[in-house]
Amino acid sequence: MKVKSNAEILEFLREIVNPLGVSVVEVEFKQGKNPSLTVFINKEGGVDLDTCELVHNAINEPLDQLDPTFGLAYTLNVSSLGVDWPFKTDEHFISHIGKKVEVKLINSIRGKKMLDGELLSYDGKSITLKVDAKNTYTIDLKNTVKVNEYVDFD
């Protein structure tokens, strides 16, 4: 099945959704027996079912006009990212500078493959993470499996 690029769909949807106070973070198209387009959203304070419904209603008709599948049927899903969604874009990293993040590593640093701390900087190739008062690390993104917002379950 031929589909428009994720980048084109993402840009199109941002123009519709951003005025609602919601960010479109990622789109994912799954092909197969039941093709689907999932739009992942985020909002300050979190995403609830009402927010997903609001966005679904706002984008459903405009997506029909964009025709991302060139006339073929698909199911539209709108979802939150979940609490531990991985950072994938520059925007994700930059929006979390000064916040606590969790980093899963390929190669350990001082015997640890998981680090958490304040994200001090991001340059597209590496991040700087302040783990505590004595330890700050610059970590090559090629050495990371996943970087995400730190979630405290206490």
Image (tube, rainbow, N blue to C red):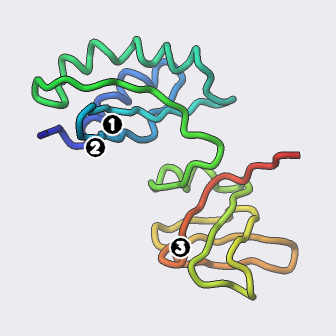
Vertical position of residue 98 compared to residue 1: above or below:
below
Callout 3 environment at 10 Å: few (<14), some (14 to 19), or many (20+)? Answer: some
The dot on residue 126 is 3
Determine the CA span between mark 1 and mark 2: 5 Å
Determine the CA span between mark 2 and mark 3: 23 Å
The residue tagged 1 is 10
Q: Are marks 1 and 2 in contact (CB under 8 Å)?
A: yes
Kind of residue at badge 1: Leu
Mark toward the viewer: 2 or 3: 2
Q: Mark 2 falls on what kind of element?
A: helix
The dot on residue 7 is 2
Kind of residue at badge 2: Ala
Residue 84 percent coordinates (x, y): 63, 49
Callout 2 environment at 10 Å: few (<14), some (14 to 19), or many (20+)? Answer: few
Q: Is residue 40 left or right of residue 32?
A: right
| Residue lying at the far bottom of the rendered structure | 110
Vertical position of residue 53 compared to residue 43: above or below:
above
| Residue lying at the far front of the rendered structure | 33
N-term-proximal mark, 2 vs 3: 2
Q: Mark 1 falls on what kind of element?
A: helix
Kind of residue at badge 3: Ser
* Residue drawn at (46%, 20%) of the image: 19
Determine the CA span between mark 1 and mark 3: 25 Å
* Residue drawn at (51%, 20%) of the image: 52
Vertical position of residue 151 compared to residue 46: above or below:
below
Residue nearest the observer in this picture, 68 or 11 = 68
Q: Mark 3 falls on what kind of element?
A: strand
Residue nearest the observer in this picture, 35 or 94 = 35
Q: Residue 45 occupies which quadrant of the picture?
A: top right
Q: Is residue 47 left or right of residue 36?
A: right
Callout 1 environment at 10 Å: few (<14), some (14 to 19), or many (20+)? Answer: some
